Amino acid sequence: MLKEKKLEFQQTLEEYLEQQKLYEVFESLMKSLITQKPADPIEHLIKKLEQPEMLRIVLLRPPGSRGKEIALSLAEYLSE
């Protein structure tokens, strides 16, 4: 019985972590710590969590396909 409850709790926890995308948040935080090696890691993590996540998009297009217009329309759509 205890084993079943433990398994159920673990599954519920994993679902929550995936739904909230917390694995990605933890991974991003750890990568930041490893690459930047801040003197004050706690302060660094707090600042990182307070910053809004920047969305980056790469737009690949053939020449003459109105790339600038597409990029501006996409930026306007995503800023809503």
Image (cartoon, rainbow, N blue to C red):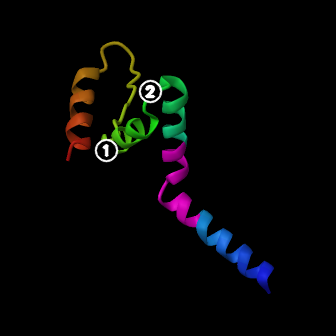
Q: Is residue 80 visible?
A: yes
Is residue 24 magenta-colored? yes
Q: Is residue 47 above or below residue 70?
A: below
Please report the residue visible at 51 percent of the width from the left and 53 percent of the height from the top: 22
Query: In the visual, does 50 lie left or right of 24?
Result: left
Mark 1 sits on what residue?
50
Q: Which mark is residue 6?
A: none
Q: Position of residue 72 (x, y in %)?
A: 21, 29
Query: In the visual, does 13 lie left or right of 72?
Result: right
Q: Residue furthest bottom?
A: 1
Is residue 65 magenta-colored? no
Mark 2 sits on what residue?
39
Q: Secondary structure at mark 2?
A: loop
Q: Is residue 63 above or below residue 61?
A: above
Q: Position of residue 25 (x, y in %)?
A: 48, 46
Please report the residue visible at 41 percent of the width from the left and 22 percent of the height from the top: 60
Q: Nearer the viewer, mark 1 or mark 2?
A: 2
Residue type for callout 1: Glu
The magenta-colored residue range is 15-26
